[in-house]
């Protein structure tokens, strides 16, 4: 019985993450017909194959030939960069490219990757900001999502 519950939770979790990524990809209209895509991250490649699906697209191993460059940039990276800039006046250099993983956190990405046997390692973050976000998340659930939405509305 416990094994069946685990499988149901696993499939429900994966479905929820896929829905969230699908929604962000469709709202932002990131991919178009006949795009040449450069992807280094296997998790982003998985989502592009799964969600974009049958839309005519090509993948390349040379970033200079690509029309779209996909970077590994999660919600945690976005929040970390914002807090670094706001509190510590450290501006990270702007990343050029689009992010497929911007609507999910590092923990969700790691868990999804583990469930689907995909290699994923999150980007390095400042320990101070990571600890601050973790403490806030413990006190007020959904802090990262709220902060991410606030960052988007400020832009």
Image (spheres, helix red, strand yellow):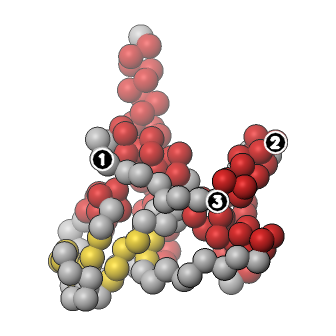
Q: In which quadrant of the rendered view does residue 112 lie?
A: top left
Question: Residue 138: where, in percent of width, then height?
Answer: 76, 40
Q: Residue at x 29, y 58 (%)?
A: 42
Near-viewer residue (40 or 116)? 40
Q: Residues within 10 Å of mark 3 (few under 14, many from 20)?
A: few
Disc sitting over residue 118 in the figure: 1
How many marks on residues? Answer: 3
As drawn, the label of residue 126 is 3
> Which badge, 2 or 3, comes first in the chain's sequence?
3
Residue 143 lies, with reference to residue 101, above or below; the image says above
- Neighbor class of circle 1 (other Cα within 10 Å; few <14, some 14-19, many 20+) is some
Judged from the image, the secondary structure of the residue bearing numbered disc 3 is: loop
Camera-side residue: 15 or 63?
Answer: 63
- Marks 1 and 3, Cα distance to the nearest angstrom? 25 Å
Q: Disc 2 or disc 3, which is closer to the eye?
A: 3
Residue drawn at x 37%, y 74% as measured from the top left:
70
Residue 94 tag number: none
Nearer mark to the viewer, of 1 and 3: 3
- The quarter in which the N terminus is drawn is top left
Of the two numbered discs 2 and 1 on the same chain, state the one appearing first in sequence.
1
Q: Which residue is mark 2?
A: 139
Callout 2–callout 3 Cβ contact below 8 Å: no
Image point (46%, 62%), residue name:
101
Q: Position of residue 100 (x, y in %)?
A: 43, 67
- Element under label 1? loop
Helix, strand or loop at label 2? It is helix
Circle nearer the N terminus (1, 3): 1
x then y, percent, for residue 34:
21, 85
Dot 2, how many residues are within 10 Å of its Cα: few (below 14), some (14-19), or many (20+)?
Answer: few
Looking at the figure, which quarter contains the C terminus?
bottom right
Q: Residue furthest top?
A: 1
């Amino acid at each position: 019985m416990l094994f069946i519950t685990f499988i149901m939770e696993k499939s429900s979790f994966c479905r929820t993450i896929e829905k969230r990524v699908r929604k962000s990809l469709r709202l932002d209209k990131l991919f178009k017909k006949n795009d040449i895509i450069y992807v280094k991250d296997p998790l982003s490649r998985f989502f592009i194959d799964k969600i974009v699906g049958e839309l005519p697209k090509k993948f390349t191993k040379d970033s200079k030939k690509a029309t779209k460059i996909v970077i590994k940039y999660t919600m945690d990276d976005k929040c970390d960069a914002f807090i670094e800039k706001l509190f510590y006046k450290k501006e990270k250099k702007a990343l050029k490219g689009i992010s497929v993983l911007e609507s999910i956190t590092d923990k969700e990405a790691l868990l999804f990757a583990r469930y689907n046997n995909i290699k994923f390692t999150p980007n390095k973050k400042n320990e101070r900001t990571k600890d601050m976000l973790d403490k806030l998340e413990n006190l007020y659930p959904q802090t990262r999502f709220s902060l991410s939405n606030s960052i988007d509305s400020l832009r």
